Image: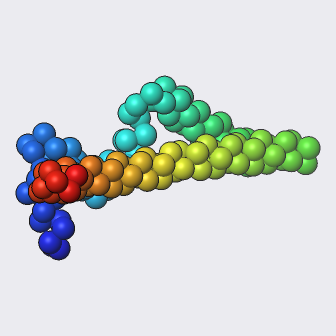
Amino acid sequence: MSKIDELINSALEQDDKALFEKLSGDMNLVDMAASVFQGKMRWLSIMITVWILLLTLIAIYCAVQFFAAEATRELIMWAVAFGFCMMAIMALKLWFWSEIQKNAVLREVKRVELQVALLHQLVSAKMPASQA
């Protein structure tokens, strides 16, 4: 740990230490995915998860019907429906992963903001009044 990190840790109050520990820890994949279901956009994340599950079931149904079809027209219809479901699932999952990435970036920005604020407090507390 560098000298600046030691200064920041010594300046942290108890409340700030809990927040800093929450923001500084690396999250595993499950925690990152669960973080998408928190906050103001929680309802949208739940709705998209439900759509992903629904489209997965429809895609499975289309695949089963594809292998059961006998006419060429039916084969094409079920294959197109399956392809559409898979593309929609892919698009929704890309949105989900972008939300995970956004939350990770926001967590790092908050961590840096906290460190800068604490460093400012530490420097202003140690600076003599004549220099301020």
Residue at 75%, 49% (x, y): give it: 83
Residue at 54%, 50% (x, y): give it: 98
Q: Is residue 83 left or right of residue 54?
A: right
How far across and how far down the image is residue 4, in percent?
A: 18, 67
Q: Is residue 25 above or below residue 31?
A: below
Residue at 26%, 49% (x, y): give it: 117
Residue farthest bottom in this picture: 2
How far across and how far down the image is residue 5, in percent?
A: 17, 65
Q: Is residue 65 left or right of residue 90?
A: right
Q: How many badges with numbers are in the image?
A: 0
Q: Is residue 47 left or right of residue 38?
A: right
Residue at 48%, 49% (x, y): give it: 102
The type of colouring in the image is rainbow
Q: Is residue 82 visible?
A: no
Q: Is residue 3 visible?
A: yes
From the viewer's side, name the closer residue of 26 and 90.
Answer: 26
From the viewer's side, name the closer residue of 117 and 49.
Answer: 117
Q: Is residue 114 left or right of residue 81?
A: left
How far across and how far down the image is residue 26, in percent?
A: 28, 58
Q: Is residue 124 above or below residue 58?
A: below
How far across and how far down the image is residue 129, in percent?
A: 14, 50
> Which quadrant, please, contains the N terminus?
bottom left
